[in-house]
Image: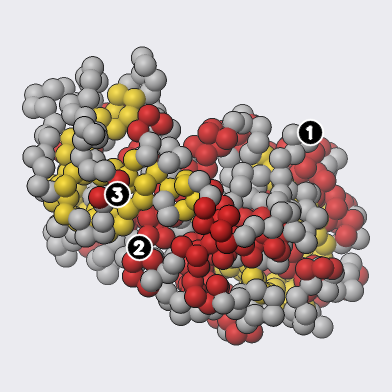
Amino acid sequence: MRDVAVLGVGQTRFGELWDRSFREIGIEAGLQALVDAKLSSAQLGGLYLGNMASGSLLDQEQIAPLILDYAGLARRHLPAVRVEGGGASGALALHAGYLAVASGLYDYVVVGGAEKLTDVPDATANQITSATADHEWEVVFGATLPALWALIARRHMHLYGTTREQLASVAVQAHAMGAKNPNAHYRNKLTLEQVVGAGPVAEPLGVFDCAPLSDGAAAVVLGPLETARQHTDTPIRIAASQVACDTMAVQHRTDLTSLASTQEAGRRAFAQARRAPADVQVAEIHDAYTISALLSLEDLGFVEKGQAGPAFAAGEFGPGGRVTVNPSGGLKAQGRPFGAVGVAQVVELVRQLRGEAKDRQVAGAKFALAQDVGGTGATSVVTLLERAN
Amino acid sequence: MSVARFWRETPRRYNLGGSKCTTCGTVYFPPRSVCPECTSHRQSIEKMVPFQLSGDGEVLSYTVVHDAAEGFEMQVPYVVALVQTVEGPVLTGQVVNIEPDGVRIGLKVRATFRKLREEGKAGVIHYGYKFAPAEDPPVRPPAGRPAGVPVSEAPARDRAPA
């Protein structure tokens, strides 16, 4: 296995992109990444595309060749593969692209992630996203994706004393970060009172505890580290890429307040990179729900189990804290176009490690972590990135 | 959801039919064909036997749902809980016969047979388990009815009269 680097990045704005089609946003992100990597399409070996639900959202399957076609590459007959893992689809596609380059099968690949959630009514989009939970034994009985996370939240509050305000602090920070990101779905700031007082979705979670339904696309170009300097002055090495899975349904977890898939993917990733959580300066984590951010921080090893609430509320994961979490605004503020999320996390971290994140720049960022989760944690993907010197 | 897709799970959703590993004794719901607890999964193949849950348990966690799942729009706000059964498995289900404010972690509950949802006015009606406070008399699925055939109205009201 050879070392793999991120050579180029691209991303569309996230949000309600009424005037833009799935193929337009997919191509925009991909072409940006190719230009950023100074890569000729003749050098390209293949395309991996993360997407959760194009069939049920857009009545369109085979979207990987579709994007390849509209990127002008159909006549090269390149392999184009869609990868699906619910909300973790983007990071799973990155894992697939990483393996392809690391193995030597291809030299250069584009990894994209794209989702168009606003071409269907909100209620339909919510049903489709709840399909990332166990339909037969959770959804049929009245559970939704936010309801399942609410069950986890209530149990976490019961066991560890996590408070409503501590949960809300996650959303407040996300919006403060998103306000600095021109690509973010939401750029408005929120107060703790607004989050706590918002209408309930599934108690104890309210509207502002939940990430929005967004459209958007992101892409990266991967290639071998040994030739990376031909493409960029600041290659970012993928120090680890690890996937771990767990039971589909929350009810089957041995520990209801832990994401075992995140624990395991994180443990494997740090082992692969021979590093530890203390080495991370900046992280993009799964804050689709305020509670999911707290669990993620605990299960990645940034804070002891049960202690993420007080630590987050005290600013330990904000600017100047022990790890700066979700400088992009995260899923909560930058937005949640499911299949694009995992790729967009890496786009943000590459910008951070290059020192190109402008107002959002985390000083001294050298080593970064991305964590992408499908459903309530049946899939977790952890990617570690470092600036190659 | 097609009729067949719901109908084939009737023994589980109507009667809480689970399975038990005869190698290690662990009980599962819904039934599994392989035991995740056995150190060698192969040991458990063809050694899983049907096992009937009693329906007794207690609330491990709960949420009051305001943004409903498909087919549950008329029931909001409704309570969904994780219920720890006395036999071991944890089940996800609604808690009924009690106001949402009265539900607590640790509440003793018992499975009861109810209408889950209907697919529009002319669509299939889905039945299955919900949970009610343990002191309430349980509703059992009607005997002798062909599995999966819809009936015209719910066997019991989901909410206590105000």
Q: Is residue A84 left or right of residue A224?
A: left
* Quarter location, residue B37: bottom left
| Alpha carbon distance from label 1 to label 2 | 42 Å
Residue at mark 2:
A155
| Alpha carbon distance from label 3 to label 1 | 44 Å
At label 3, counting other C-alpha atoms closer than 10 Å, the crowd grade (few under 14, some 14-19, many 20 or more) is few
- Residue kind at label 3, given as amino acid type: Asp
In which chain is the residue bearing label 1?
A
- For image coordinates 46% across by 77% down, the residue present is A307
Q: Is residue B106 above or below residue A239?
A: above
Residue A153: give x, y in percent of width and height. 41, 60
Residue at mark 1:
A19
Foreground residue among A255 and B133? B133
Residue at mark 3:
B101
| Mark 2 on the same chain as mark 3 | no
Foreground residue among A342 and B56? B56
- Residue kind at label 2, given as amino acid type: Arg
Q: Between label 2 and label 3, give the one nearer the viewer.
A: 3
- For image coordinates 46% across by 40% down, the residue present is B67
| Alpha carbon distance from label 2 to label 3 | 17 Å
Q: Is residue B134 left or right of residue A309?
A: left
Callout 1 secondary element = loop
